[in-house]
Image: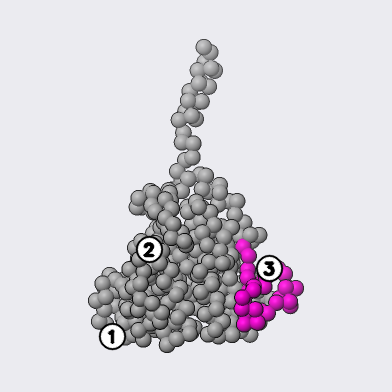
């Protein structure tokens, strides 16, 4: 055998010994495989180690082309009108009004424009105030069963939505002070990404049950500085939702886990947007101040000062950690 043949043999042997789908990084420091429930309650075993194939799948998602923007107003409360970045002509044909406040909704993993998150919050906002509601359908990025790819897609989608908002403001004269951005699960972190890419000037950002898997050590996690006032509602803390504080004000209804009337993690995870919806059209929920998220989760909160959870108006300048109790069925608020 020639020296060339021997060398080639060892090169081929070395290449064949490399992993077929190399691990690039760990999304979290915990267990590699975890069960994460989808919107329908189905548990999916997901891999929280980022592989080369995950990056390749995420790279196929183009939010500038694939994200879809649905406009709902009191003039069209049930059938949406399209909005398209760069298309000023559509603005003259739909019911968008820059003089009104604008609500932006961002769904989570395996969801889309028809998800419960949207069907609950769209009518609640339109009932409470004459606003523009823009539902962002980023299911082209969030709809994959590959959770690691969906986590990765959250970032470029947020950047793309921020571009859309900046364009909309530039052509209509609307201001970031007129916006309320709300996201659920993966969409909660995306709401923060949008806010920081609009310079932190969005008046009101609400993170509903910001996702936990894949975000513990993620540099793009929701931050207090993402908006002028940022609020977080935890209803499945430490399981599907983030446990520790993330915003200016963090609320832990019923301790942040095991919601009354629920018998599943997904029900807990979804309660956050039902509570927000009720807060828009009722007297709302009052939280009492806690020393830490640990005392909030145990209900041992006796510090001076209360704060209302949710609602239409940002509590600009307010901050803290709060505990409250709810009923098992609507009306959820105990006042």
Q: How is the image coloured?
A: one colour
Assign the C terminus to one quadrant of the image.
bottom left
Q: Give the side of residue 200 with respect to residue 95, left or right.
A: left
Ranked by sequence position, the earlier of labels 1 and 3 is 3
Side of 30 where 154 appears, left or right: right
The nearer-to-camera label among 2 and 3 is 2
Residue 27, image x, y percentages: 42, 53
Residue at mark 1 to residue at mark 3: CA–CA distance = 48 Å
* Frontmost residue, 18 versus 257: 257
Query: Which residue corresponds to mark 3?
Result: 84
In the image: residue 281, left or right of residue 329: right
Q: How many marks overall?
A: 3
State the CA–CA distance, disc 2 to disc 3.
36 Å
* Image position of 196 with respect to 54: above or below: below
Pick the residue in front: 117 or 204: 117
Give the number of the disc on residue 265. 2
Q: Which residues are magenta?
A: 67-96
Query: Which dot, 1 or 2, sits closer to the camera?
Result: 2
Quarter of the image for residue 28 reads bottom left
Q: Residue at x 26, y 75 (%)?
A: 299
Q: Which mark is residue 264?
A: none
Is 93 a magenta residue?
A: yes
Q: Which residue is mark 1?
A: 304
């Amino acid at each position: 055998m020639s020296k060339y043949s021997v060398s080639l043999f060892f090169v081929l042997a070395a290449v064949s010994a490399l992993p077929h789908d190399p691990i690039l990084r760990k999304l979290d420091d915990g267990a590699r495989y975890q069960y994460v429930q989808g919107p329908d309650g189905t548990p999916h075993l997901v891999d929280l180690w980022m592989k080369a194939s995950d990056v390749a799948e995420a790279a196929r998602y183009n939010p500038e082309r694939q994200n879809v923007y649905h406009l709902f107003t009191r003039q069209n409360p049930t059938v949406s009108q399209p909005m398209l970045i760069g298309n000023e002509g559509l603005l003259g044909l739909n019911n968008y009004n820059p003089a009104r406040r604008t609500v932006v909704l961002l769904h989570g993993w395996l969801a889309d424009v028809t998800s419960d998150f949207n069907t609950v919050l769209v009518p609640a906002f339109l009932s409470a105030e004459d606003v523009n509601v823009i539902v962002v359908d980023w299911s082209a990025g969030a709809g994959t069963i590959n959770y690691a790819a969906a986590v990765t897609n959250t970032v470029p989608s947020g950047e793309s939505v921020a571009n859309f908002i900046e364009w909309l403001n530039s052509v209509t004269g609307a201001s970031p002070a007129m916006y309320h951005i709300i996201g659920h699960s993966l969409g909660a972190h995306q709401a923060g990404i949008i806010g920081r890419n609009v310079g932190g000037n969005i008046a009101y950002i609400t993170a509903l049950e910001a996702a936990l898997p894949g975000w513990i050590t993620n540099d793009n996690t929701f931050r207090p500085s993402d908006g002028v006032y940022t609020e977080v509602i935890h209803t499945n803390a430490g399981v599907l939702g983030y446990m520790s504080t993330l915003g200016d004000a963090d609320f832990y209804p019923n301790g942040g886990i095991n919601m009354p009337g629920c018998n599943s993690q997904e029900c807990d995870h979804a309660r956050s947007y039902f509570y927000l919806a009720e807060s828009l059209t009722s007297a709302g929920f009052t939280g009492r101040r806690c020393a830490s998220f640990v005392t909030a989760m145990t209900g041992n909160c006796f510090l001076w000062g209360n704060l209302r959870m949710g609602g239409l108006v940002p509590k600009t300048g307010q901050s803290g950690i709060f505990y409250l109790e709810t009923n098992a069925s609507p009306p959820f608020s105990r006042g």
